[in-house]
Image (cartoon, rainbow, N blue to C red):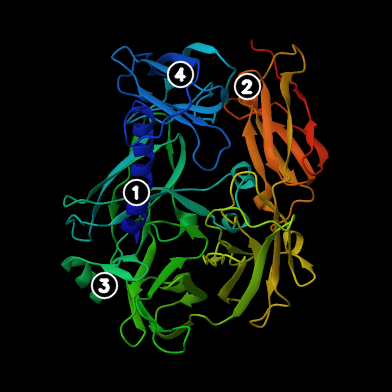
Amino acid sequence: MLRRLIVAFAFAFAAHVILAQAAATPPEHPAQPKKPAGNCTVSGRVVTAAEGTPLRSARVGLVEANVRKHPQVYATITDSDGRFELKQVEAGRYEFFASHVGYLEQHYQAKGTEDGAVLSLAPSQEAHDVLFRMVRAGVITGKVVDDTGEPMMNVNVSALHKPSEEEREDEAPGSKKFEMTTVSAGSTDDRGEYRLYGLKPGEYFVEATELGGGFYFPGQIFENGSERLLQEMGSQFAPLYYPGVLQTDQAQAITLSAGEEAQADFAMRRVKMVEVAGRVIGPDGGPPARSYVSLSLAGVRDWGGELAAGTDGSGEFSIKGVSPGTYFIGAGMRDKDKFYYTRLKIEVGETKIDSVVLALGSGAVIHGRIRTASGAALPPGRNNIRLQQVGEESGFVFGYNDVNKDGTFEISGVGDGSYSLLTLGLDQGWFVKSAHLGNEDVLQNGVQVEGGAVKGSLDIVISSDSGQIEGTLSDSEQNQPLAGVQIKAKPEPATDFNYMRNKTVTSDQNGHYLLKDLPPGKYKVTAKMPKASAADAAVKPESAVITLGDKEHRSLDFKLAVPKAE
């Protein structure tokens, strides 16, 4: 399971690199669409934060801000003196950052590892002498051995982080229930050694897990010989948290400073593990074709801590090497253009569980339709409907079904519970104006499924009549512009079912911000300094409530009381 996610991230990373390379390709290159000729220039240097040493071969890029699809991208590489220059850049607002192996990504005018400011370029503007001071990333490394001292290969090791209350503010309701979430993961080599890199300064908990499952994509299984044996036998070693304990509340945090390399070794414990087995029933009532089953600890979003197995021709599955605890067990399969998924919460003790039944396609079938507010045809794009469960089982997503040409859709197998409506993959500038399930307002009350049924069909109305809020951030004492301030707009009142309307931007080097493509409605807008230092943390956020109409542009300025530098 871990490698499945790593491969997915690798594909995403490869796509990012290809995009950056394409951005640096001359316009005449046949594989690269010609960019509009700009007349702005951006130049500067990339150095290390600690010594001020020039960094050669750092990647520096401009990515058009707040554009979901096909943003303008400009990129280059620093020379031996750490210098870079980006020419023929179009005027606009850009995310501006530098990256280098072994260092944390550094954003324009960032303090420490914060997000930094947007770079705003007027026509013919030249931004010179930009300086990126890159902070070295932290590393956690170590060795994993068995109870005889022999090295263990292919043990998954994860660095987990407990989100702060501030970090949880921006998370979807489905993510807020996770006590810890994985930020980095890797496997031990033939020496039993691992290395987790690219870590920001902070506290981490480290987990080591020997998994008994193979390498799974929905409908596919990839295993080598040793993985087949491990799946058949199951692990005999309990998952451990550093420094070698079984429970998260007994784990010891590792505190990393910038560029620090910490050591976390594990001596795995051989304990009694159990088997979780059962069968999966397909949507037609028979054994499903190419389905998979996964088992994950409740309360932990862990790339490396999920056990998995495929079903056989009879729909039966077996997951061995499961330690006692509270788990979610889920089954999924894809059939043509539909994806089915279901899951249960189970308690695993010291005895085998062999009667788990997972029925795909059971639960509610939700029929619905998307239409435009004006009655015009739907905008182009691969629109889809997704529902995310909130409450005790938060984070679970149903429905990846594409919308038909006439706007109709169907989501099958939705279990009882409360759900929020997720993004629809709409083109830039489009938004959900309203959503009703029967007479219920989905954006306020969500989709409620009871007794395997819903009341009515799901009617979704979309519009492009969005509004915007813009303004300036300044120091209340000296009236100087404040760059890199976070401005967050949240619906008022905020609920678990309208969080997708949340929007966050940062002010540019002139203290200007722009919140665009906002659905009409009432918002609480908050300006908050990033907590890069004790002085910044002491700056009180400022908020205002503003109501936005169709296509309305509102102005809203903020003044923050920033302490004078000593």
**Residue type, mark 4 in image:** Gln
Figure quadrant of residue 313: bottom left
**Mark 3, residue position:** 231
State the SS at label 1.
helix
Whether residue 321 appears in this view of the structure is no
Against 491, residue 147 (above or below) is below
Between 352 and 173, the one nearer to me in the picture: 173
Please state, as top left, top right, bottom left or bottom right, where the C terminus lies in the image. Answer: top right
Do the residues bearing badges 2 and 4 touch, measured as CB atoms within 8 Å?
Answer: no
At x 32%, y 11%, the residue is: 81
| Tag of residue 483 | 2
Separation (CA) of disc 1 from disc 3: 27 Å
Q: Position of residue 364 (x, y in %)?
A: 61, 79
Do the residues bearing badges 1 and 2 touch, measured as CB atoms within 8 Å?
Answer: no
Q: Which of marks 3 and 2 is nearer the N terminus?
A: 3
**Mark 4, residue position:** 88
Figure quadrant of residue 146: bottom left
